[in-house]
Amino acid sequence: MHQSGSRPIVLFVDESPWRCFDQLAAYLRRSGARPIRVTVAPVSGWFRRLVDRSLYGERVELAGPDGRRRLDELLASGRVVDVHASEGAIAVLGPGSAVVARLAACALGARGMGAAVVDKYAVGRRLADRGARVPCQLPVGDVDVDQAIDALGLPLMVKQRVATAGIGVRLASSRAEVVAALEALGGGRSALTYEQFVAGEVVHYAGVFGPDGPQHEATVVPRRSAANPLGPAVAVTTSDDAELRRIGRQLVSWLGAEGLVAVELIRDADGCSWPIDLGPRVWGNVLAPVRDGAALFEHYGKLIGLAPAGSPVRTARSGRTHVVQPRGLLQAVAVGRPIDIAAAGWDLTWGYGRLLGLRYVAIVWFEALAAWRTRRRPAPGQARAARPAGVIE
């Protein structure tokens, strides 16, 4: 166990709370690291402050000069071993800013490309240059709408170059929808790109990468909600996909990323895999396959020096579907039957609790209880909701 003055520091940089950041922070704190939340916006609400105090060793708010000075101290300390930064926070800070460059220099996931690793267009170009089959992309600032449609056909995707969780993505099936997507996404034409639409099944490769390659891997098929088909997965089905592992390893090696890395691909009707997104940080469904043998957090901890390196272990079972937690529990509390709540609660407590600890489980159950009370006695004119505003899955 590291002493408090020498514990490795992992920074989590966000624009609003991220559940997957909280999960990895809970694991790291239990394992002897010092997770620190760095947020670009002021934190409000007693519950969020309680979460930060329980799961993180410290919170740094960049809205004021004291926060910037504290971040400078942390980055200069030599103890920061990794940085997990949300695309939203990077967009706020400025992808080309000095502070983002300094964060990228400490981030394992940005080893090969620096801050450009979160730019969808830059990642696509780098992979295409190495020979990967990637959807064709055209920067919005380089072509007009009609030129994009002529080159890519319809439907096509309109994407923010730095975004995640489906927030900056639109599928457009007509010229009018392309124009509407451009207006909705905004952010300046240089921040957007058109992308070729590829029909097929979404597949997901994830791994923990060290200097010598993958230490641990998992392959899953994500399942999204009908209400948000471009958004984060609500469940995953485990797989044992050797070809996907081969492709995933190759793509990550071409980018030079290390640490926790995920690649999302489209597998078309001919069996060809097209990479469409890279996650050089922890992601929303990272723990969903944990009960089938996926040990991404444990191997990540070993990578950053929290325990001796062990033998790699791949997912033991495949073909089983797991709901992403805590979304599953909160959704069951919002609209489910008591038996649904019990099943989701057991899945969270047993599957995640052993890894993340009592503090994390207690926080989620407290949130679930608050959602239950809202469901039982909603305020007049207030819609029932299980997820606090601003929380990213």
Image (spheres, rainbow, N blue to C red):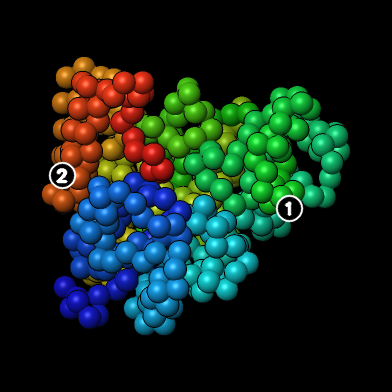
Count how many numbered circles sit on residues in the image. Answer: 2
- Checking the image for residue 66, the label placed there is none
Q: Residue at x 53, y 71 (%)?
A: 99
Residue type beneath disc 2: Ala
Viewer-nearest residue: 279 or 140:
140
Q: Is residue 326 visible?
A: yes
Q: In this image, 286 relative to 265: left or right? A: left
Residue 272 is situated, as x and y percent measured from the top left of the image, at 61, 37
Mark 2, other Cα within 10 Å: few <14 / some 14–19 / many ≥20 = few
Mark 1, other Cα within 10 Å: few <14 / some 14–19 / many ≥20 = few
**Distance between mark 2 and mark 1 Cα atoms:** 44 Å
Q: Residue at x 38, y 49 (%)?
A: 18
- The quadrant in which the N terminus is found is bottom left
Question: Disc 2 or 1, which lies upstream in sequence?
Answer: 1
Q: Secondary structure at mark 1?
A: helix
User: What residue would you read off at disc 2?
Assistant: 362
Q: In this image, 6 relative to 39: left or right? A: left
Viewer-nearest residue: 365 or 273:
365
Residue 377 is situated, as x and y percent measured from the top left of the image, at 22, 22
Q: Secondary structure at mark 2?
A: helix
- The quadrant in which the C terminus is found is top left
Looking at the image, residue 79 lies above or below residue 284? below
Q: Residue furthest left?
A: 358
Q: Residue at x 52, y 46 (%)?
A: 164
User: What residue would you read off at disc 1?
Assistant: 190
Residue 83 is situated, as x and y percent measured from the top left of the image, at 42, 65
Q: Is residue 322 visible?
A: no
Residue type beneath disc 1: Ser
